[in-house]
Amino acid sequence: MLLGITYILNSLMKVPSIGLRAINKPKGIFYAYAASSCVTITFGIFLVKFLNIIGAVLGTIISALTVLLMTSYCYKLYINMGNKIGSFNP
């Protein structure tokens, strides 16, 4: 059941990721996956060590949540930057 949460988060992550590609800002996607890698390496090791297989699933959920939050943040950041400039020129 917990692994199903990962699939939901991954499908939700696609929306801001496609938005970032549409406005030609793939750096946001890179930053999201870089942050996710750091979080996974940091927390994943401890979760697997102490919670075994449940820890691995929780680490995957935390990683997917990190990508979702970072891509959403980058998308909103780039959209707000474009609105402040007046005309959006990627």
Image (cartoon, rainbow, N blue to C red):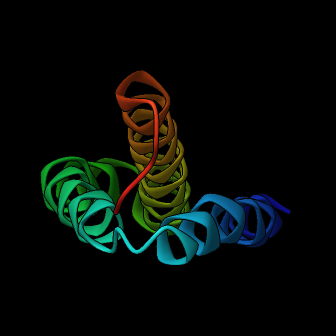
Residue ID at (22%, 60%): 31
Residue ID at (44%, 49%): 88
Above or below: residue 63 compared with residue 26: above
- Considering every residue shown, the one lying at the far top of the view is 84
**Which percent across, then down, holds residue 79?**
50, 40
Viewer-proximal residue among 37 and 30? 30
Quadrant housing the C terminus: bottom left
Above or below: residue 56 compared with residue 85: below
Viewer-proximal residue among 63 and 14? 14
Quadrant housing the N terminus: bottom right
Viewer-proximal residue among 24 and 29? 24
**Which percent across, then down, holds residue 37?**
21, 66
In this rendering, the count of numbered labels is 0
Above or below: residue 38 compared with residue 50: below
**Which percent across, then down, holds residue 60?**
48, 65
**Which percent across, then down, holds residue 38?**
14, 56
Residue ID at (71%, 64%): 15
Quadrant assignment, res 32: bottom left
